[in-house]
């Protein structure tokens, strides 16, 4: 019952699954305990409560592995992949592929179709549309065979979105209207909201502003029914883009403020509910319980052996064994607790520094917009504002994760430097390059690590020059280290220090150095920074990141 209503009423899904879990525990029905945990996790994931979803998935996975239930182990991989699909595409694909391999081996068509469908979503987000449509169509063939109308409705919604991205507008509309028709019959409010959102963007692209506004209103009715902050925020962002295109700049700014307010709420929620952190926390609890069980079994075997020798020796050995075991267990527990507490403190300190960088970043970027607004250059202000919206959105996306891929970092740096170039077209030029041997999708680095150094190079190196300057950033692999080289032909770091009228230290650079210090405390291999002036002017920064 709980699983069937997951799309229409996730809150009720959790209530019913919780009742099932209590009953299963009461009669010691292990398959029921496992499935109730899994379905409760699904309900929490639809309500965007990642910590509770993670907790229930880990519990379900533990029981299904004990039972040797391959089908449901694969379903858990699929569920965990869904948690990652908005924040880490590589990890999402890894979990989906693990589940797909199991589903194919056990010939489970329903599960195989779901895995194909979710894999298609990830390829769509990575702009690999041919792979996306190939996996979508594989899933659709199975959905039709199984007469799964719910999944078919969701298929039309998502393939309509893909065709829109590919520029095939007529095909996109056809699929979206099919999705709306099917979803209305089934009461799938989340799917209806997604279909109307995609249609709104199509109408906006075609300058059909009235139809766009009507579509947004219709879609927001369904978004409110599923209580999804993410979907509601997507419609608010569409309102912003609509008013921007209508040149109603005051209304556009009002909606933009709402978007950033909601993005901040989502960011805080995601930062406080980091998937990896929660997964590791629950797995560690399970490992501790397993170790305690092993210790208990060892003590039992020792006691049994002692009875064979003599009763007196048994009493003596048992007494000594209990005392020693108690002492060592207590010491091991004390050391383990100290390590866990220290790691938790260090992690929280790192998150606090990471969060402090967000307002610092936004403040600096808003200064770039103020210049054009003060000059009443609406066209240029609009261009910079759009660039800022894309940059800030990407900034919020990468702040969710403690690490990101090199590819994501390259995209982020390009957005930042292109915006500074827009503001000062004659003052600065830039180049971003990387060694072709680097696997930019697989190699990950700490997020928000490189941009502050580029910002420093532009504002304290190039801007003080009377003529224009250049800044370059290059990624290279040296053994097992990623080497990032930032070079500018500005006035030079030593000359910049001499020009400063006060001893003011950049807050952004202070925060990044403190964060690197904390990262080095958590990791075995340290990140190193070498900063020097090249001759009479110019600065070179070398950042070495262990991989």
Image (cartoon, rainbow, N blue to C red):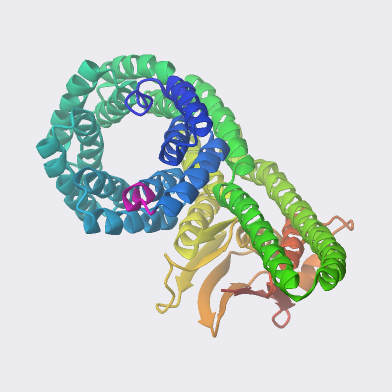
| Residue at 41% from the left image edge and 51% from the top image edge | 67
The quadrant the N terminus occupies is top left
* Residue 492, visible in the rendered structure: no
Q: How many marks?
A: 0
Please identify the dominant SS of the magenta region.
helix
Which residue is painted at 22% across and 45% down in the image?
113
Coordinates of residue 282 in the picture (x, y in percent): 60, 48
Q: Is residue 47 left or right of residue 140?
A: right
Q: Nearer the viewer, residue 61 or 303?
A: 303
At 40% from the left and 44% from the top, the residue drawn is 79
Q: Is residue 20 left or right of residue 175?
A: right
Task: Find residue 513 and report its image quarter.
Answer: bottom right
Which range of residues does the magenta coloring cover?
68-74
Q: Which quadrant of the view contains residue 140? A: top left
Which residue shows up at 47% across the image and 58% down it?
Answer: 408
Using the rendered image of the protein, determine whether residue 235 is visible from the camera's viewpoint. yes
Picture quadrant where residue 303 is located: bottom right
Residue 211, position as x, y percentages in the image? 26, 17
Which sits in the foreground, 461 or 444? 444
Q: Is 150 within the magenta? A: no
| Image location (x, y in percent) of residue 512 | 72, 59
Nearer to us in this view, 457 or 282: 282
Q: Position of residue 2 (x, y in %)?
A: 38, 25
Q: Specify the quadrant that holds the C terminus.
A: bottom right
| Foreground of the two, 292 or 191 | 292
Q: Does 488 appear above or below 96?
A: below
Relative height, residue 480 to residue 409 (above, below): below
């Amino acid at each position: 019952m709980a699983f069937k209503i997951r799309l229409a009423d996730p809150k009720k899904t959790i209530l019913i699954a919780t009742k099932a879990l209590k009953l299963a525990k009461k009669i010691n029905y292990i398959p029921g305990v496992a499935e109730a945990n899994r379905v409760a996790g699904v309900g929490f994931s639809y309500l965007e409560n990642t910590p509770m979803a993670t907790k229930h998935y880990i519990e379900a996975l533990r029981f299904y592995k004990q039972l040797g239930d391959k089908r449901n182990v694969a379903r858990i991989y699929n569920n965990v992949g869904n948690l990652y699909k908005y924040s880490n595409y590589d990890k999402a694909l890894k979990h989906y592929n693990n589940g797909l391999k199991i589903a194919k081996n056990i010939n489970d068509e329903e599960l195989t179709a779901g895995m194909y469908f979710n894999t298609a979503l990830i390829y769509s987000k990575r702009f690999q549309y041919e792979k996306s449509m190939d996996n979508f169509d594989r899933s659709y063939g199975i959905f039709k065979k199984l007469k799964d109308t719910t999944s078919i409705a969701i298929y039309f919604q998502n393939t309509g979105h893909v065709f829109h991205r590919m520029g095939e507008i007529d095909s996109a509309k056809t699929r979206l209207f099919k999705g709306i028709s099917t979803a209305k019959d089934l009461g799938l409010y989340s799917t209806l909201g997604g279909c109307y959102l995609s249609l709104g963007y199509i109408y906006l692209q075609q300058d059909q502003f009235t139809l766009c506004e009507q579509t947004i209103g219709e879609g927001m009715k369904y978004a409110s029914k599923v209580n999804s902050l993410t979907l509601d925020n997507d419609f608010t962002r569409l309102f912003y883009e609509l008013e921007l295109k209508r040149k109603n700049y005051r209304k556009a700014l009002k909606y933009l403020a709402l978007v950033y307010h909601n993005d901040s709420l989502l960011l805080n929620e995601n930062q406080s509910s980091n998937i990896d952190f929660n997964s590791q926390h629950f797995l560690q609890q399970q490992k501790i319980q397993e170790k305690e069980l092993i210790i208990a079994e060892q003590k039992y075997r020792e006691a049994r052996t002692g009875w064979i020798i003599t009763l007196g020796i048994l009493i003596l050995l048992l007494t000594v064994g209990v005392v020693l075991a108690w002492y060592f267990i207590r010491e091991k527990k004390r050391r383990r607790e100290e390590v866990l507490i220290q790691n938790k403190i260090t992690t929280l300190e790192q998150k606090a520094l990471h969060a402090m960088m967000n307002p610092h970043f936004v403040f600096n970027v808003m200064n770039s917009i103020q210049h054009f607004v003060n000059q009443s250059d609406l066209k240029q202000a609009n261009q910079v504002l759009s660039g800022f919206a894309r940059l800030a959105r990407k900034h919020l996306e990468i702040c969710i994760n403690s690490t990101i891929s090199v590819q994501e970092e390259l995209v982020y740096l390009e957005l930042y430097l292109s915006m500074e170039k827009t503001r000062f077209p004659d003052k600065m030029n830039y180049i971003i390059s990387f060694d072709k041997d680097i696997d930019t999708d697989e190699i990950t680095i700490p997020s928000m690590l490189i941009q502050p150094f580029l910002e420093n190079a532009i504002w304290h190196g190039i801007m003080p020059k009377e003529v224009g300057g250049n800044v370059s950033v290059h990624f290279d692999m040296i053994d097992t280290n990623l080497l990032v080289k930032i070079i500018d032909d500005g006035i030079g770091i030593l000359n910049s220090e001499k020009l400063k009228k006060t001893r003011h230290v950049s807050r952004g650079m202070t925060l990044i150095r403190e964060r690197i210090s904390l990262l080095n405390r958590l990791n075995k291999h340290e990140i190193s920074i070498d900063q020097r002036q090249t001759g009479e002017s110019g600065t070179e920064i070398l950042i070495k990141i262990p991989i």
